[in-house]
Structure formats: C-alpha cells, structure tokens
Amino acid sequence: MRRLLELVTVLAVLSFTSRAAGAQVCDPALMEHAERARDYVTSGTDARLAHEEWRRALDGGSAVVWTGTLYDVDARSFFVLAFDRRSIRIYRLGQLAAPLTTRFGGVPEWPGRDRVTFWNAMAGCLPDDVTPAATVPWSAVRELKAGNWVLWFKLHGPVSIESDRGKRKTVREIKVNLHGASGDVQYYFTYDPYRGYTNVRGVGFGPAAYQERVRYTLISFFDPKGRIQLPKQSRGAGW
C-alpha cells in the first residue's frame, strides 16, 4: 500500500509539472520567424524578406513583439506589445520579467537572460496564464499616425492601462515608442566672417523612417481593407 501511495504521489507531481510546463510551449522555428520579423523592420532590411518572416510568424499563430514606452500612461515604465492577427496585447514588463530592478529615476533595468518568460515573449511565445494589462482589437483602431519618435494608435473608445508603478490611465489613443531605433542630431550654426562659426546648437530628430516602416508593416498585415486612417507623417524635431 505504501509503495502504491508513493507511486500515486509521483504521478501527481509529474502531472502537475507537465501542466505547468504546458502553460508555455514554444516552437523554436516559429520564434525565429517572429524575432526576424521584428528585427528586419527595425533595421530596415528588404521589405520582401521582412514580410515573409511576418507571414510565417502570424500564420503559425505567433505574434511579433516589441518593448515600448507608453508616454501617456507612464514615461518611466516599460511595456511589452504583442501584435497578432486579432489584436494588440499590452503587458506590463513586470508581468513577464519580475522581479524588476530599477536604476536612477525609477526606470527599470533591462531583464537579464535568466528571465526566460520575458525572452520567450520577445520571440512571440507569450504565456497563456498571464492576462494582458490591456487588449485592443484591430477593429478598435480608427487611425494610425507616425511621428518622429512615436506611433499614435487612435481608438474608437477608451482603454484603461496600468503601469508597474501603479499609474493607471484611461486613454483614447496609445502614444508609444516601440524600442529598437535611435534618432539623430542635426547641428545648426551661424557663420561670422570675423569670428567663424558661432551659436552652434544641436536639434534631436527621431527615427522617422523607422516609425513609417513599422506603420506600413502593421497596416499591410492587419488592415488589408484600408479601414484605418493614415494621416500624413509629421517630420521635425517634435514627436
């Protein structure tokens, strides 16, 4: 009887472990497609190659994932945004990479490689047992605007999003910087024939071409009927 009880206990533990492990079963090949899909858009790789990776990832049921800053929610918190056929899923960084550590100013440290759930999520394999902080169906997006530093997802109705620092905002547009591309600095000056160059000043410009690549790619896959409005991209030193 004792041996039978031990066997039943072992089987129960194995069953529990199997169910826990089954909460996130990742396909390595699909994860590679999802990572390349994001990285090719970020780096400006040939759009034909990028779109093929997107197609393979999405057709396999995966998502293409970025980390991002949602400025109208909390500029000192990071979020994880997953784009799939149905919706935009927004997670708090802490949901996928806890416990978080922060540096000066309260901004989170980048998760180390030991945060397996986070890195799996960045490759499109998101845990089934973690509920997103917000889910925005593509049908709820009425306009997608590209700026220099951010994209604006303007919505038909409000959505509430809470950050890891407990800041909760209800917004009708999601202003997000999808991390991955840095901007540039252009220098302006005044020339004086007696004193040379004077009044030198630098003006920071965002990666506008990157924002437009992301917008074009998202629209190509998630709005084939052209329902979402696409205002002309604003360029300059601002958002």
Image: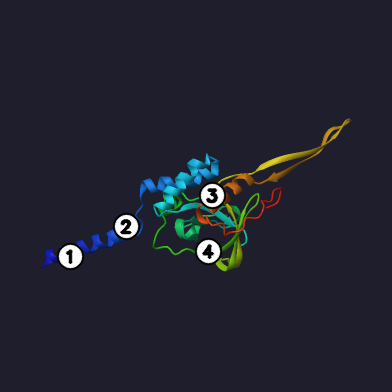
Upstream in sequence: badge 2 or badge 1? 1
* Residue placed under numbered mark 2 in the picture: 21
Instruction: Say whether residue 232 is visible.
Output: yes
Marks 4,3: beta carbons within 8 A = no
Q: Is residue 36 left or right of residue 234?
A: left
- What amino acid is at disc 3? Thr
Q: Is residue 93 left or right of residue 189?
A: left
Quadrant housing the N terminus: bottom left
The mark lying in front, picked from 2 and 3, is 3
Upstream in sequence: badge 1 or badge 4? 1
Upstream in sequence: badge 2 or badge 3? 2
Q: Judging from the image, what secondary structure is the residue with disc 4 in?
A: helix
In three-dimensional space, the C-alpha distance between marks 1 and 4, rounded to whole angstroms, equals 49 Å
- Image vertical order of residue 11 relative to residue 118, above or below: below
The mark lying in front, picked from 4 and 2, is 4
- What amino acid is at disc 2? Ala
In three-dimensional space, the C-alpha distance between marks 4 and 3, rounded to whole angstroms, equals 17 Å
Please tell me how crowded label 4 is: few (under 14), some (14-19), or many (20+) other residues with Cα within 10 Å. Answer: some
Marks 2,1: beta carbons within 8 A = no
Disc number placed over residue 8 in the picture, else none: 1
* Residue placed under numbered mark 4 in the picture: 139
* Residue placed under numbered mark 3 in the picture: 217
In three-dimensional space, the C-alpha distance between marks 2 and 3, rounded to whole angstroms, equals 33 Å
